[in-house]
Amino acid sequence: MKKVLSFSAMLMLGLLLSQVLPGVLGADYEVTREGVEVLLGICLAFIMINVGREFEVDKSNIKSYAKDYLVAMLAAAMPWLLIAMYYIFVMMPSDWCGNGAVWKESLLLSRFAAPTSAGILFTMLAAIGLQRSWIYKKIQVLAIFDDLDTILLMIPLQIAMIGMQWQMGVILGTVVLLLWIGWKKMGAFTLRCDWKSLLLYAALTYGTIYLIYILTKHCFGEEGSVHIEVLLPAFVLGMVMKHSSCASKADDRAASFISMLFMLLVGMSMPLIHADAVVEQSTSVIATLPMPSWGTIALHVVAVSLLSNIGKLTPMLFYRDRSLKERLALSIGMFTRGEVGAGVIFIALGYNIGGPVLLISVLTLVLNLILTGGFVVIVKRLALSVELSSKN
C-alpha cells in the first residue's frame, strides 16, 4: 500500500517540479530536461525487463492460452477505446470530430488506460496463502498479456503518428525480429539478475536505441531518423532471461526506488500547463484546447477513471464456469495501475502532445494509483470469501 501511495506522491511531486523548474533554471532547464529524458528511458527499460522476466508460458500447451489472450486483449482495448471516444466526443469541439490528427492524438493519450500493474496484488494474495488459487494464477497470465498487448498496440499508433515512411518499415522489421527472438529463446539465457546487472542491461538497451536514433538523425535529418521505443526491446530482453527467483531484499528495494524515480521523472517531463505555454511548447492539435477550470478537470478525471475501470470488467463476461465473485475479483484486479501506464504517457510526451487532455490523463493515473490499495483489499476479500466457501 505504501509503495502505491509513494508512486502517486512522486508523480505529483514531479508534476509540481515541471511547473517550477523552467522558471527557476531559465536557460539551463534544457540541459536538465535532456538529462531527465535519458534517465526516464533507462528507468523504463529496467521496469520492462522485469515485466519480461515475469512472462512465462507453457509452449507445449499454447492453445490453452488462446482464450486468456483474447480476454486480455479485450481488457486492454475496451478502456482505451472508451476513453478515446470520451476525449473526442465529449472534450473536443464538434467540428474537430472529423480531424484525423485529433483522432491520432486522442488514441495515443487514451492508451495509458489499459496497462495493469499487478505486482502488489500478487504479493498480497501470496501473503495470505492464495498463490494456488484460480484468481491468483489467472490474473498473473492476464496482467502480463495485458502489458504485452499495450506494447504491441503502440506500433499502429506509431504508424499513425509518423506515417508509413521507410523508417516504419525498419521499425516493423525490428518488432517482428524481436518477437521471434523472444518466443524462440524464451528463458534460454542464464544472465545475472541482481538489480545492478539489470540496470546495466537497461542502460545498454536504451543506449543502443538512442545511438540508432542519433546516427539516423545525423545521416537523414530529424524527419528521417529511426526512433524505436524502448518498451519492446527491454521486454524481449527480460523474456529471454532464464526465469529464476533471484531477488534479494536489496534487489526489491532497488527496483522500488527505480520505479519511484521513474514516476518522479514522468511528472517532471510534463509541459507547462497554463494555456499560453501549452500552445508554445506543443505542436499537437489538441494542445490548443483552452484549459478548463480545476473543477471541470476533476469531473473529467472521475469520468475517465470510471470508463477505464468499466472497460476492465471485460473478464466478467468470460470464464462462466467460475463463480461471479471469482470473475469480479479477477476484473477488479485488472483495475490496478503502475509504471507501464506512466510509460505510455512518457511516449505521448515524446510526440509533443500537451494540453488539458494530457493533464487529465496524468491525474487519472494518479487517482487510480491512489485507489489501487482499495482495489487490492476488495480482491483480497473476494478471494478469501471464495476460498472459505470452497472449504465449507
Image: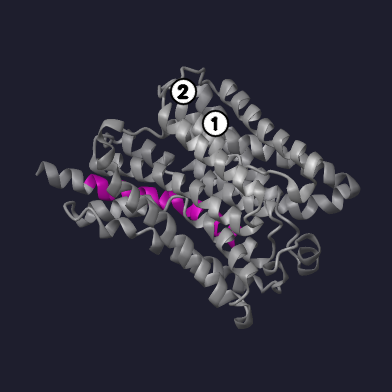
Residue toward you, 35 or 111:
111
Residue toward you, 263 or 286:
286
Q: Amino acid at mark 2?
A: Ala
159 sits left or right of 67 in the view: right
Which residue matches tag 1? 255
Residue 247: assigned label: 2
Q: Residues within 10 Å of mark 2 (few under 14, many from 20)?
A: few
Residue occupying the point 49% across, 30% down: 238
Coordinates of residue 304 in the picture (x, y in percent): 50, 66
Residue occupying the point 67% across, 44% down: 227
331 sits left or right of 24 in the view: left
Question: Where is 48 relative to 33, above or below?
Answer: above
Coordinates of residue 210 in the picture (x, y in percent): 70, 36
Q: Residues within 10 Å of mark 1 (few under 14, many from 20)?
A: many
| Residue placed furthest toward the right | 27
Q: Amino acid at mark 1?
A: Ala
Q: Are marks 1 and 2 in contact (CB under 8 Å)?
A: yes
Question: Where is 216 relative to 186, above or below?
Answer: below
Quadrant of the snapshot with the C terminus: top left
Coordinates of residue 137 in the picture (x, y in percent): 29, 39
61 sits left or right of 189 in the view: left
Residue occupying the point 33% across, 44% down: 139
Magenta-drawn stretch contains 380: yes
- Is there any visible trace of residue 13 in the rendered image? no
User: What segment is highlighted magenta in the picture?
Assistant: 360-384
